Amino acid sequence: MSSYQIPSPSPSLEELARRQQNVITASQLRARGVPTRTVSEQCRRGGPWQRLLPKVYLLQGGEPTPEQRMWAALLYAAQDGRQEGRREGAVITGAAALALYGFASAPRLPAVTGVEVLVPRQRRLKDAGEVRIRRTERELEARSVHGLACAPVARAVADTLREWTDSAAFDTGEVHPAQLRAVLRESVAPGENACTTRDLLAELAEAGLLTEPRVRAAVDELLAAGRESALERLNELVDEWLLPVPLAGPELRMKGGTFVAVPDLYWPGAAVAVEVDSELRCVSEGEAAWVRGGQHRMEYLGVRVVYVSADRLEAEPDAVGGELREAFLAGGEDVVELLTA
């Protein structure tokens, strides 16, 4: 039996202003009994209020703070003047979102001159002031950052990079390739506001950025560094679990010389191979198909292949070590003799 819950009252104007750092929409004011005429009077030159964006007001004088600018952008994109309390989907993305997340490699909030806001494609909304509307056909995801709805880190990074490429910021020198690499590294570095490499690559691919030479070079560097770190940790696990030292990156061929694969690690005597983040190793589908082909050939020829993700290696090293030992003891099955080089 469900209990009846008394609907909570809407917050007062003072409480709402406190929550939204003094930024209020026309519909919020109207719902709290503030006539349109009063709003106009308060916003006259020298008045105590000011209009920041269409139907968005700041209930104080002076320059708005960076946070108030973010609130104004979000409320402008999310407001629905027809019904109080109803909001359309909208999230801050791009460089503004990275600034809110506290990225050290991105411009700080006061330096962010434009605010990108992501909305559903069907919304009828125009750019206004420093607010740039970006539309998407995908369902919006939001993360609360200082009370503001922001796109997840991977999406915010992709939109930042697209913003930089669209504005030719790399060509003009406004953004240096080193900053691009730093943003990518920071986005996947361990921490509260990090994303997985898999999510980052998916967003970059969705945005069509992996064909942009500078972005592609930075992504390749990121993946190489991540794999190197994972392989170092994997070798430490091998030592901790008292396993023999495996071959690193050997080229496997059949007796007749037919190429098979190049696994990350390989124990010839046990016919056991280890592949680390193999699905993230390659950016292009052609490279990925080449890697998958090698894995399928190893398995077909009886090699036991252990697939390890860097994320799991970081989160569950003991479990991964146990799986490596179990695989080594079990060995391959009906293995075709392979040569290593």
Image (spheres, grey):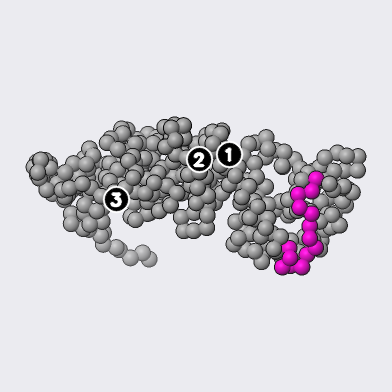
Residue hosting label 1:
217
The kind of residue on which mark 2 rests is Pro
Q: Secondary structure at mark 1?
A: helix
Q: Is any atom of residue 116 visible in this view?
A: yes
The picture places residue 149, in percent across and down from the top left corner, at 36, 50
The kind of residue on which mark 3 rests is Glu
Q: Is residue 166 above or below residue 84?
A: above
Residue hosting label 3:
67
Q: Secondary structure at mark 2?
A: helix
In terms of sequence position, does the residue under pointer 2 or pointer 3 come before the other?
3
Q: Residue at x 81, y 42 (%)?
A: 260
Residue hosting label 2:
177
In terms of sequence position, does the residue under pointer 2 or pointer 1 come before the other?
2
Q: Gap between marks 2 and 1, in whole Å?
A: 9 Å
Give, as a single range, the part of the protein colored magenta. 238-251
User: Which image quadrant for residue 37?
Assistant: top left
Q: Secondary structure at mark 3?
A: helix
The picture places residue 123, in percent across and down from the top left corner, at 34, 35
Q: Is 233 on the left-hand or right-hand side of 49? A: right
For discs 2 and 1, the disc positioned in front in the rendered view: 2
The kind of residue on which mark 1 rests is Ala
User: Which image quadrant for residue 211?
Assistant: top right
Tell me whether circle 3 and circle 1 mark residues in contact (CB < 8 Å): no
Q: Residue at x 87, y 51 (%)?
A: 335
Q: Which mark is residue 62?
A: none
